Image (spheres, rainbow, N blue to C red):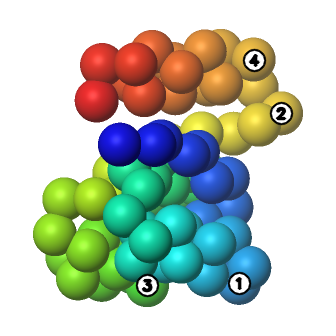
Amino acid sequence: MNTVLVTGANRGIGLEFARQYAVDGWRVLAGCRNPDSAQALQRLMRDMEGRLSLVEIDVTDAGSVQRAAVEGDQG
């Protein structure tokens, strides 16, 4: 199964990219800065039955990016 990381997946075009990849059968790592406030993304996760994982990431913070990479490798 192919894997993709989508940043900004909590809304807008990032959310739609995450949705489309999941529908097409990809494993999606859906990244956003604040997972607790990402209600639309959480609903999508429930709808996609395990094809989508929420990853907390701030692309301006190198440590956050590294943690997301490790989580993606383990996931």
Q: Would you name the residue on which mark 4 appears?
A: 62
* Amino acid at the residue labelled 1: Gly
Extreme residue toward the right, this view: 60
**Residue type indicated by callout 2:** Thr
Count neighbours of disc 3 (C-alpha within 10 A) and say few if under 14, some if 14 to 19, many if 20 or more.
Answer: few
* Circles 4 and 2 in contact, beta carbons < 8 Å: no
Residue located 23% across and 82% down the image: 47
Question: Is the N terminus in the top left, top right, bottom left or bottom right quadrant?
Answer: top left
Mark 2 sits on what residue?
60
The image shows residue 64, relative to residue 46, as above or below, that is above
For the point 42% across and 56% down, the residue is 26
Horizontal side of residue 55 vs 10, given as left or right: left
What kind of element bears circle 3?
Answer: helix
**Residue 29 drawn at (x, y percent):** 46, 47
Give the CA separation, mark 3 to mark 1.
10 Å
Give the SS element for disc 2: loop
Mark 4 closeness class: few <14, some 14–19, many ≥20 residues within 10 Å = few
**Would you name the residue on which mark 3 appears?**
40
Q: Is residue 53 left or right of residue 2?
A: left
Residue at mark 3 to residue at mark 2: CA–CA distance: 23 Å
Residue under the image location 58 percent in, 45 percent down: 5
Disc 4 versus disc 1: distance between alpha carbons?
Answer: 24 Å
Q: Residue at x 61, y 81 (%)?
A: 16
Label 1 crowding class (10 Å Cα cut-off): few <14, some 14-19, many 20+? few
Inspect the image, locate mark 3, and give the three-letter code of the amino acid beneath it.
Answer: Ala
Amino acid type at circle 4 is Ala
Q: Secondary structure at mark 1?
A: helix
Labels 2 and 1: the sequence-earlier one: 1
Structural distance between the alpha carbons of marks 4 and 3: 26 Å
